[in-house]
Image: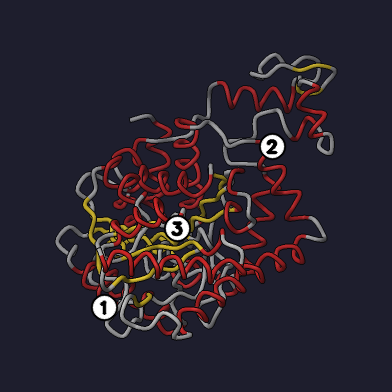
Amino acid sequence: MNPLAGQLNDSIKAGNEHVYDMLSSLGKAIYFPKEGILSQSAEATAHAKKYNATIGIATENGLPMHLGVIQDKLSAYSPKDLYGYAPPAGKPELRSVWREKMLRENPSLEGKSFSNPVVTNALTHGLSIVADLFAEQGDAVIYPDKNWENYELTFGIRRLTETVNYPLFTEDMNFNSEGLLDALLSQKDRGKAIVLLNFPNNPTGYTPGIKEGEAIVAAILRAAEEGINVVVVSDDAYFGLFFEDSLKESLFGKLANLHPRVLAVKIDGATKEEFVWGFRVGFITYASENKELLAALEQKTLGIIRATISSGAHPSQTFVLDALKAPEFAAQKEEKFQIMKGRANKVKALLDSGKYGDDVWTYYPFNSGYFMCLKLLTVPAEALRLHLIHHYGLGTIALGETDLRIAFSCIEEEQLEDLFDLVYAGIRDLEKA
């Protein structure tokens, strides 16, 4: 093992031996080089005042070399904020501003010890970092039966973990905290579990209420008290889009420093929060009361980034940072929030109006995010999906035998009634066939 990896492991062990035990073999072996091209370039940048012949970019007149056909379209930004490599951890100011935003929007983080967010290539990359650092072959990765299918690729296929699902909802359509607890306790013999919490949930658009959130935290705590090391990941992709009476902050704040056997990780980003999907700017943040442990986890995270993408895109980070600092940012974001809330409320009003009866579908609770899910009662979801595409020009997502996901996020409010009329017509077509 590289001595640098050994030093990082020693820091993690000293800070919390349970967190060391959570690391995968790759997580234990990975490190960020202190010597080599990056460190020598950094030293040269600080001290080589005459010539710096270390940087792997081209320069001209003291700035990164660039083409006019690109810079002409980006002239509001300095070439130094666009073309050079961003640091592997991301632009320092962006990391600081995002941390401030996290504290502002998550009051339960006040007084908690957590790392400076590290920039990722959006949320999928953050999840893959978690998988690389903590998921070993055969480890249980626990998440509900209503989930984002990429979890299986990121953890199950890439890292050969075992998926443990539990029903998202109870019979009375509350979050199934007992199911989560049962799934956790089933790993008592192994002594380790990775839990993925995604609220607002994709595909249902559901965020638990305050009491449900407390039950989730209690389940994680109970598992830790039973001797299970739990890596609990808050996948906050749709954070902030809370339209009704639900949790209004990430559970990361309540999970941070909950128990020595619990490592809380937050994956979030500008991708959906700030409506910049193609910018691919996300963040990964760890919670621990031990500063040396946090520093070691950051170094291991940078090792994964260095070994995979090297660093995130610089222009995207500049654009996001500039937006977060803009005086108009809050007002413009609120305007888009109200549009999304209006669409969600319109869908709920349509479904509750009685227009479609109660014999063709029910719907899963939704109060947040981009999506809602119908539970079809009379026709298969995949057959309906195909029928809607080919006969009505309407695209939806079929999930399993009964569930049809509809993204109201990309449909104008005045078009939603027509959309559900078409879904209803499609069901009646298939019933007659």
Asked which secondary structure carries label 3, the reply is strand
Which corner quadrant holds the N terminus?
top left
Q: Which residue is mark 2?
A: 315
| Up/down of 113 relative to 301, above or below | below
Q: Earlier in the sequence, mark 2 or mark 1?
A: 1
Decide: few, some or many residues near mark 3? Use Cα within 10 Å; few <14, some 14-19, many ≥20: many
Q: Which residue is mark 3?
A: 265
Amino acid type shown at disc 3? Val
Judged left or right of residue 111, residue 66 is right
| Location of residue 133 (image quadrant) | top left
SS assignment at label 1: helix
State left or right for residue 23 relative to residue 64. Answer: left
Q: Amino acid at mark 1?
A: Glu
Q: Is residue 239 left or right of residue 308?
A: right
Residues packed near mark 1 inside 10 Å, few (<14), some (14 to 19) or many (20 plus): some
Q: Residue at x 58, y 51 (%)?
A: 271
Relative to 359, residue 116 above or below: above
Where residue 79 is drawn, which disc sits there? none
Quarter where residue 329 is shown? bottom right
| Residue 295 position (above or below residue 144) | above
Give the percent coordinates (x, y) of residue 6: 37, 37
Q: Which residue is mark 1?
A: 178
Estimate the x, y position of residue 309 in percent, counting from the top left.
50, 32
Sequence-wise, the earlier of marks 3 and 2 is 3
| Residues at marks 3 and 1 touching, judged by CB atoms closer than 8 Å | no
